[in-house]
Image: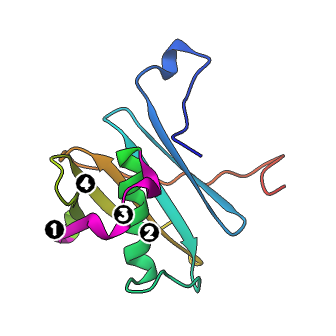
């Protein structure tokens, strides 16, 4: 557990990463603009009481971007919908703000990406295929 660290090359300095698993899928988010979090769950998975699956994915993405994960009470995460730009999110009682977008990574997966900071969050999907993928 904990935030992934990219290393082994000076070219990776300053990059932030997050990883989530949903069934057989693995999703990865990388950002040069600040701490990032991604969460993904298979459609049909039961959400914790009091939330929808989409809300839960958003909450987990914010908590991963925060870096403390579920050590923070998920009930403290708040959202303000900003239409096509996604959501503004924050943890109640704290100053940090997060840009959050729902992300289409496939028909069987609910996913969201959050990044600390209020700048635009440009999400690009790259599907991998070839030898070793899908093992």
Real-space Cα separation, disc 1 to disc 3, in angstroms? 24 Å
Asked whether, in this view, residue 66 is left or right of residue 84, the answer is right
**Which residue is labeled 3 in the image?**
73
Question: Which badge, 1 or 4, comes first in the chain's sequence?
Answer: 1
Disc on res. 99: 4
**Which residue is labeled 1 in the image?**
82
Q: Nearer the viewer, residue 24 or 129?
A: 24
Is residue 103 something that shows in the picture?
Answer: no
Real-space Cα separation, disc 2 to disc 4, in angstroms? 14 Å
Give, as a single range, the part of the protein colored magenta.
68-83
Marks 2, 1: nearer the viewer: 2
- Element assignment for label 1: loop
Real-space Cα separation, disc 1 to disc 4, in angstroms? 10 Å
Marks 3, 2: nearer the viewer: 3
Asked whether, in this view, residue 94 is left or right of residue 74, the answer is left
Marks 1, 3: nearer the viewer: 3
Q: How many residues crowd mark 1 within 10 Å: few (<14), some (14–19), many (20+)?
A: few
- Decide: is 78 above or below 100: below
Q: Nearer the viewer, residue 101 or 63?
A: 63
Q: Are the residues tagged 1 and 3 within 8 Å (C-beta)?
A: no
Q: Nearer the viewer, residue 100 or 96?
A: 96
Q: Is residue 102 magenta?
A: no
- Element assignment for label 4: strand
Q: Is residue 76 magenta?
A: yes
Is residue 65 something that shows in the picture?
Answer: yes
Question: Which badge, 2 or 4, comes first in the chain's sequence?
Answer: 2
- Element assignment for label 2: helix
Which residue is at 55% across, 28% downward?
6
């Amino acid at each position: 557990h904990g935030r992934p660290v990219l290393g082994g090359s000076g070219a990776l300095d300053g990059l932030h990463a997050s990883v989530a698993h949903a069934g057989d899928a693995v999703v990865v988010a990388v950002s040069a603009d600040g701490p990032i979090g991604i969460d993904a769950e298979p459609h049909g998975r039961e959400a914790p009481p009091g939330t929808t699956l989409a809300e839960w994915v958003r909450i987990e993405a914010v908590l991963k971007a925060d870096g403390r994960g579920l050590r923070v009470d998920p009930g403290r995460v708040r959202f303000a919908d900003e239409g096509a730009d996604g959501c503004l999110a924050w943890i109640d009682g704290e100053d940090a703000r997060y840009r959050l977008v729902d992300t289409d990574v496939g028909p069987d997966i609910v996913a969201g990406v959050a990044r600390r900071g209020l700048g635009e969050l440009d999400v690009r999907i790259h599907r991998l295929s070839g030898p070793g993928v899908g093992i």
